[in-house]
Amino acid sequence: MRISILSSALVAAVVGFASTLALLIAAAQALGATPAQTASWVTAICLAKVAETLILSWRYRTPIITAWSTAGLALIGASTGFIMEEAVGAFLLAAVLLVITGLFKPVTQLVERIPASVSAGMLGGILLPFVLAAAQSARFEPAFVLPLAALFFVLRLFNPPFAVIAVLAAGVGYVLFTGGMTGFAGLEASTLVFIQPEFSWPALIGLGVPIYLVTMASQNMPGMAVLRTDGFNPPAGPIIAVTGFFSFLSAFFGASTTNLAAITAAICTGKDTHPDQDKRWLVAFPYAASYAVFALFGASLAAMFSSLPPALISLVAGLALLGPLANATSIALMKEDERIPAMATFGITASGIAFFGVGAAFWGLIAGMILLAMQRLRKA
């Protein structure tokens, strides 16, 4: 197996796990979850991602990478008045709604008909803040960040796939050498804890439905955009239905919804992973293996990743996403008559605005589609 496949998978897994793990912990705390329930949440959600990624990637020979719903975790973390058992009931409802969506053709057909320019504009807007965050991290820890950035750009001249993993290894090595990793006592195996769901209308309406909506708008739709931007076009319906099915199973052990990845998927779907598009789906195996390890040692790894400097995670994510950002921008600008709608989508998505609990990716997409429809009506 090519080193580029292993590198892309490992970086995507580490960035996806470490960069948003704090959201999962905050969500568990907001629900009053016990340490055992929190560890079970991490383990179950990682196992769901392993199963989804392997099944979907093998079935469609496409690098279909799944992730937990970052927007959903943020929504849970901001909620008050719910207990863990009620949240499990809400997670089950969100999962059922995802399955229904995947099996209901009009909804999935709507996703599949989004123009490539607008999809790429949305993807670029999602990726831009991460690239900017990498540059901004040098402002706070220049002595740590700048040498690692220089290492990346030098190594990329000779071996692009190895450059990001070298930066990650060098950064972790420096942290260990300087004693900067605190709060990590060693690896201990995690266990699954069954949680009896409680179904209450406030939780179902206040958590379950919003989680479903933000997962579709902020995760699944951008996730499909990533695949389309890099030349893959698997059917959206079965993919969404499968993620809903495994979200349903894992919910009984405390896990919130899983879905198509967007940011981390972009690391795995481009030419840096493999020049042969037909072989990029092999990235699913090392990616799934990484999350199998995360599942086995979920609680301990949560403590370990929380100990890494935020600047290192920001830098690795931003550098890994430079290529996908360049590719998305080039596709967004490819058709001259679609550039304004695509760039409007890009700008609104990158702004981070949110209305009614729905993130900027959705509103950027809506704006781009409206502008594109206006242009086509004007020409008709």
Image (spheres, rainbow, N blue to C red):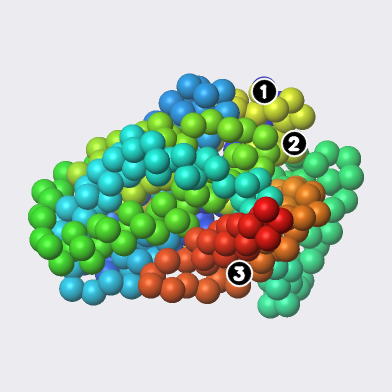
Residue 318's spot in the image, x, y percent?
A: 68, 58
Instruction: Compute the Cα span from label 1 to label 2.
Output: 11 Å
**Where residue 278 is drawn, which disc sits there?**
1
Badge 2 element: loop
Residue 360's spot in the image, x, y percent?
A: 52, 67
Q: Which residue is mark 3?
A: 348
Q: Nearer the viewer, mark 2 or mark 3?
A: 3
Instruction: Compute the Cα span from label 3 to label 1.
Output: 33 Å
Rendering quarter of residue 124: bottom right
**Quick check: 75 left or right of 127?**
left
Residue type at numbered disc 1: Asp
Kindly indicate whether the residue at mark 2 contacts the one at mark 1 (C-beta within 8 angstroms). Answer: no
Q: Is residue 293 above or below residue 345?
A: above
**Residue 321 in sight in this render:** no
Q: Nearer the viewer, mark 3 or mark 1?
A: 3
- The residue nearer to you, when weighing 302 against 84, is 84
Residue type at numbered disc 3: Ile
The residue drawn where x is 84% and y is 46% is 155
Instruction: Compute the Cα span from label 2 to label 3.
Output: 27 Å
Q: Is residue 155 above or below residue 149?
A: above
Q: Which residue is mark 2?
A: 271
Q: Earlier in the sequence, mark 3 or mark 1?
A: 1
Q: Is residue 74 above or below residue 269?
A: below
Residue 108's spot in the image, x, y percent?
A: 43, 40
Q: Is residue 283 above or below residue 176?
A: above
Neighbourhood count class around disc 1 (C-alpha, 10 Å): few under 14, some 14–19, many 20 upward: few
